[in-house]
Amino acid sequence: MPSSTSAPDASHFLDALSFNADQLRDAKAAVHDAPEFRRAIEDALRAGGENGLRQATMLYLLSRPDAALDALGDDQSQQGVLVRGLAALETGDPSKAAASFIGLVGTDMEGSHFLTNLATAAALSGDTAMAQKAAAKLPDGADALYSEGIALESDGEYEEARRKYEEAIEKDPAHARAMFRLAHRYDTQGDDEKAIELYGRCIQLNPAHANALQNLALLYEDHDRFQEAESCYRRVLDADPTNVRARIGLKDVIASQNMYYDEDHERREDRRAQVLRTPITEFELSVRSRNCLAKMNIATLGDLVRKTEPELLAYKNFGETSLQEIKDILAQKGLRLGMSQQDDAPLYAAPRQQAEAQLDALFGAPPAASGAPMGGAPAAPMGASAPLGGGSGDPLEVAIEQLDLSIRARRCMDNLEIRTVGDLVQHTEAELLASKNFGQTSLNEVRRKLEGLGVALKRK
């Protein structure tokens, strides 16, 4: 679709709704390249009264995949299944995307763009065989090289995957997906400089890669380049004001630029984190004390300081002598019982609240979980009481984005590929503390969030 696409062409596209994957990709590019086409889509969406597929298609074209999924409902037409798969892939649900795409294999949808998406969704959901089959159907070129690369990456062949991505970019310097996956590989390996360079190139493409913008923002935050991170988040929200991850990120960045950073305090926190990870077995304790602590699942000093004196004394066979023994050991390390509850007050509350107010003023209140379309009723502000867990009531189904974590804690979740509370509680405190830039302050924050949901991290 040429960049000069006009409003009548947009109307014809929406009335026909007979697109395939390549045509839908071209329409989405026209939204970014042709202002008249974009205005026609926005005007049609504001007019309301649309059927599910038409509304979902418009929302998808305007880079609002969450709202597109909500609007689509149970539409089982080929176009509906395609939009469902593409929107699911953009919202980070590759399994749902793969299931949708597999249902379209062998239909008129099966073109170059479709097969590339199928390879991506299959690889990201762990179906290496399906990713390889999709890649094999593609003609020689950048798409085929990219698809082969992501299939290799799914199979753990990271170096081979990297070479395929590089070959794809050599053939097509504007291949956004190959560039993003290559940047992600360097990001995962800890080569921040190379990852920043590649993400930076990726976001110069039109339309900009939303995940590249958000990953780049996180890297900028890690390097205290807050203004550049803010710019990335704002670009995401300009396209999709309902993007929860970008809203949380922007709030953190604005808060970070207004808070006083105490480097000595950070060093003290890191040192204290090391002390709290010390196993109880390293200390000379009486048999009675040791047995009682073991039965209470207290394995480290960090576990111990979260207990109060009454809690310990309430345990069978744990008396004043054992209590004094414990208090003496903690005193040697500058610790005391019950200190975790007292020292866990949220940091930087005022700047984060100010950032939230600024964000609402710029982009409006965050959307309801259902993702109301443009013109819908506003949702409660972020932080207001709302049911979590996708309406199921199960805290393990709560998305990590809904916890409203700080920069450092959220970065750890991304590094460990933790997407839900269920994923999070499969990790121990030690595993989280071993993550880059994750210290005791971040651990305390995670504990508070989980306690509010009535769950806890995995014990050793």
Image (cartoon, rainbow, N blue to C red):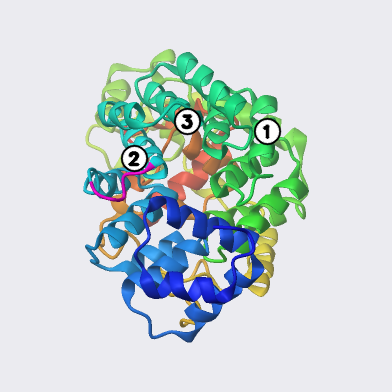
User: Can residue 334 be seen in the rendering of this structure?
Assistant: no
Residue bearing the label numbered 2: 118
The residue drawn where x is 31% and y is 50% is: 109
In three-dimensional space, the C-alpha distance between marks 3 and 2, rounded to whole angstroms, equals: 59 Å
In three-dimensional space, the C-alpha distance between marks 1 and 2, rounded to whole angstroms, equals: 27 Å
Q: Is residue 58 magenta?
A: no
Q: Position of residue 120 (x, y in %)?
A: 39, 37
> What amino acid type should be assigned to the residue bearing mark 1?
Ile
In this rendering, the label closer to the viewer, 1 or 2: 2
- Total label count? 3
Residue bearing the label numbered 1: 196
452 vs 304: above or below:
below
Q: Nearer the viewer, residue 108 or 161?
A: 108
Residue bearing the label numbered 3: 327
What are the residue bounds of the magenta stretch? 107-111
Q: Nearer the viewer, residue 337 or 150?
A: 150
The residue drawn where x is 47% and y is 53% is: 25
